[in-house]
Amino acid sequence: MSVVMDRDAVKRRIDGLVRAKRRRLRGSSQWSTEVSLMDAVFTRPSSNYETLGLISGLCLDDTRKSLRRWKLNAPELRHDLVKRIDDYALSVERLICDDEVESSLYEGVRKVVFDRNKPFYTSAMVLRRMAQKTANPFLEDVKGIIPLLDWKNAESFLRTVLDIMGEERGFRPQRVAKANEDPRIAELEVRVSDLTSSLEITQQQLESLEEELKSVREEAAQDASVDFFRELNAPTWGGLLDQLYASEGRIAKLRSEGAIPQELESTATTVRMVVRFLKKSGLKEIVPVGTKLTLSLNDIDGYIYEGSQFGDGEAKDVLVQSPGWSYRGEVVSRPSVKEA
């Protein structure tokens, strides 16, 4: 079922909501530094912790902890989030702006926004992405309020917008004010909605913190392991991980040629066993040595690049010189590549 909306009525109600929200905020609500990090995730989902922290103004440790808490510590998870949030943002824009939409669109968006188990940042980022991507003049006032909304205010704002659109499009019963009803009642209802949303967001954040506390010991152990492996592959120690990997390859070649002296056989076996132990412990190659890749300037964050400078929009063929290493999904060292 689809219903043609009264655009003037929608405009009046949305503008009224924006004005009411501005009065209650009084300039006190600001985006947190975590929102800056989330913006960076949407701008550069493939980037490593260092780059995302640099863009958002957070230190490396805070960047890593936030992304782990949000379960966004891998590029593929961030790419999936960007796609889903952008899809929701487009659906909300269509719901507000299109003359006619199907009820299934409204129900789909409402199900996501009113889901108590969704990540607490969902509504804020849906609004923020809609404001960043839309050019529809119908949303100018909405775009103006969004930078002032924190996680909790964004939640209540988006829920109220959906209620308005549901009523105006006939997808849900419209509230009718009773005769002689005190006008303050509507204002109080909005405040109750704000408080309800705030409590739900707080609960979601508490649950997120509880999960974080449970994993602190595991994370501490992983941090120690990652730091250890990074130290092993640091230039100070001659890139021991890369050297061990390269030595294993050279030893395998010599063995196949029958060229390993008997007195070095035990050393060769030790190298092979050390590499096998490291890999069994969770250490993985990122890209095999010798792999040919085609990279653009946007891809280079994930690699140590040797070669000429990139031109605008240029892509270069490169050859992997060292594999790079990851430990349980976290990058220990980036692959090094050389322009072919």
Image (spheres, rainbow, N blue to C red):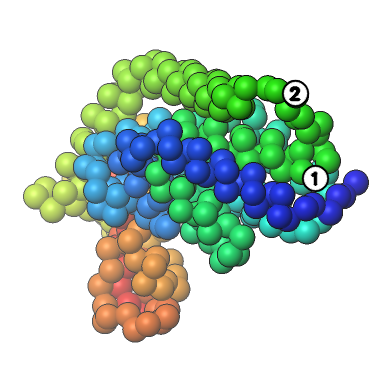
Q: Circle 2 sits in a helix, a strand or a loop, which is it?
A: loop
> Does residue 287 show up?
no
**Residue, disc 2:** 178
**Does residue 322 lie above or below 317 as drawn?**
above
> Does residue 89 show up?
yes
* Closest to the observer, 244 or 140: 140
The image shows residue 22 at horizontal and vertical percentages of 44, 41
* Closest to the observer, 326 or 84: 84
Q: Residue at x 45, y 21 (%)?
A: 202
**Residue, disc 1:** 169
Q: Circle 1 sits in a helix, a strand or a loop, which is it?
A: loop
Q: CA distance from mark 2 to mark 1?
A: 22 Å
* Closest to the observer, 170 or 303: 170
Q: Given the image, on which type of amino acid does mark 1 rest?
A: Arg
Q: Quadrant of the C terminus?
A: bottom left
- Report which quarter residue 251 is drawn in: bottom left
* Closest to the observer, 18 or 65: 18
Q: Given the image, on which type of amino acid does mark 2 rest?
A: Lys
Which label belongs to residue 137? none
**Left or right: 4 as drawn, with respect to 27:** right
Neighbourhood count class around disc 1 (C-alpha, 10 Å): few under 14, some 14–19, many 20 upward? many
Label 2 vs label 1, nearer the camera = 2
**Left or right: 227 as drawn, with respect to 35:** left
Q: Residue at x 42, y 71 (%)?
A: 295
The image shows residue 244 at horizontal and vertical percentages of 25, 49
